[in-house]
Image: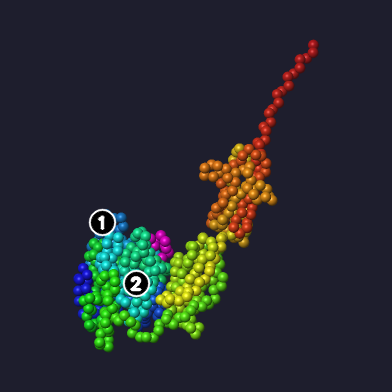
Amino acid sequence: MAAQFGRRLRKGAATTAVAALAVAALSASQGPGAITDDHGRQSTGADLGLGTGDTGDGGTATGNGRYFTDLPPLQSPNPAPTTGSDTPAATGAAEAGIPATVLAAYKQAEASLHESKPTCNLPWQLLAAIGKVESGQARGGRVDANGTTLSPILGPVLNGYGFANIKDTDNGAYDGDSTFDRAVGPMQFIPSTWEWAGRDGNGDGKKDPNNIYDAALAAGHYLCRFDHDMAVQAQMNAAILSYNNSTAYLNTVLSWLEYYRKGTHEVPDGTGSLPSHNSDEPTSPSPSPTEPSSPSSPGPSSPAPKPTPPATPTPPATQPPTTPPTSTPTPTETVDHLTNVGAGKLTATAGDTFAQKIAVRTDDKADKAVAKVRVRFTIVGDTDATFTGGESVATLVTNGLGVATAPALVAGEKTGDFTVRVTVVGRVMAGLDYTASVTARQADALARTADTALTCVPGGEFADQVEVKATYKGAVAGKVAATATLVKSADDAGENDKGPYFKDADGKPVRTLGALTTDADGLLKLPKLYADDTTGTFLLRVTTTGGATLTVELTVAAAPATATPSASPTASPTAS
């Protein structure tokens, strides 16, 4: 299969010049939402105002690497059978076939995102379209039973020649290259993005970019971050451009999305249709047999040996040199330190959004701001706080003033301190830490929801359960922690050892209940109360986080005696 793959690619290179012209026209016409300017020319992501401010490392998930430019046939495939139907799988054009395991991974990722991020409205066909463009559906479905590719799929060396310049961030752990990064796996994640975006899609306890289940789920979360809604075309376009910031790429993906939406069919693993043209395919010379002109090298896990630069002035397009073509330092290389640009004390109540956003500036040694630098914000510590959209990591690019502002922080339910660490991606230097605190939800007032007297006979049970409502500054105080205790007296908050009591799970008497929480409406209904043989007036005290306190009287008294009617007097005999 690998040999056939290479032959197809070499054969396709001969027609690249014609294909390149066709791609621009067909991409613009076939894809829904395809984008051109007023003169029919394609625009860049920046021209569209979509930018790269919320994108991954290198501005994108893939580092703007190589991708397949093949377009779907103009004739639509046969519709796929309805889910749950007994109808056999539809058949049709080879391009409409998706390998079984790869197709299962896309659909499983869609189902998972439907549960975790329902407002994203992610269609599995979008993952299939990206998978087609990035790796030809994992090289036609060359995966094992667990979904892992039979051999690594590696993109070109990102050394600044024709692609982004991204120095090694993983010490070669994912891509086998300890000098520069390379995109990895069927969805072509660069290592620095996979480090935070990776997911375990097949439940084996690992996050492997070479596994289609893991990669498809990670791609879905990547597209859906920052509350992107795939049902809104502009937001879908922005999400796709964050994967690879090229409008030609966007239109190619949209073309396959539309094609797959019209119908697909399942094919056996390893038999999928292979693409034959890629985005950087030269017209001359033809690709080397040892380096297929594809987005992903089908060779062993370690990268191909670095070639010796040829004697001719122009390096071959398929064998880029391993050093950047210029010695001019990149913006990242000029950064000396990070500067806080306004964030003060970060505090929020559980469940609320932090009022302040973290903003940093990348400065050089002369304290001059440096623009176009990738900055990573990472939430560290035992916390369930996230950035808007549910992610714990956000990577942004500094603007023209050298400033990057993190998405808003959203406090979870765990209280206490945590850290937001800011680092420069691709640079070993001191980071900048921010301490954020989450305080517990509070109530400042408690009131009973009923005013009936609470009474009971010795050895009996109270007819009514105690229900209270918590408020904070007049508003409902939901999910507030509370404690209920039968106290000794109004002045002694110690637990009473006699009188009314609650029952635990084993039916034993308890006079203190902790770990209580008001519901979303601020209501708290206590369990039933029981009385021992002691009579008198007793006190139940309910307290909440924030200092709200309510004391309720409980009365235990014998039932009033029932009056017994007296007998009628017997008439005395009359004296004779």
The number of numbered discs placed on residues in the rendered structure image is 2
The residue located at (44%, 71%) in the rendering is 394
Quarter of the view holding residue 561: top right
> Which residue is tagged 1?
87
Q: Taking the image as drawn, is residue 197 in sight?
A: yes
How crowded pointer 1 is (Cα within 10 Å; few <14, some 14-19, many 20+) is rated as: few
Task: Give the percent coordinates (x, y) of residue 245.
Answer: 37, 76
Residue found at x 55% / y 69%: 346
Circle 2 is placed at which residue position? 172
Q: Is residue 234 visible in this depiction of the protein? A: no
- Who is closer to the viewer here, 293 or 27? 293
> Magenta stretch: residue 434 in it?
no
Q: Quadrant of residue 201?
A: bottom left
Residue 467 percent across, percent down from the top left: 59, 50
Residue 205 spot, x, y in % from top left:
37, 60
Write the residue at 30% across / 62% down: 147
Between 552 and 344, the residue placed more toward the observer is 344
Work out which residue is located at the far right of the displayed protein and give it.
Answer: 576
> Which residue is more in the foreground, 361 or 524?
361
Drawn side of residue 399 relative to residue 555, left or right: left
Q: Is residue 574 left or right of residue 546?
A: right
Q: Tell me the element at label 2.
A: loop
User: Which amino acid type corresponds to the residue marked 1 in the rendered image?
Assistant: Thr
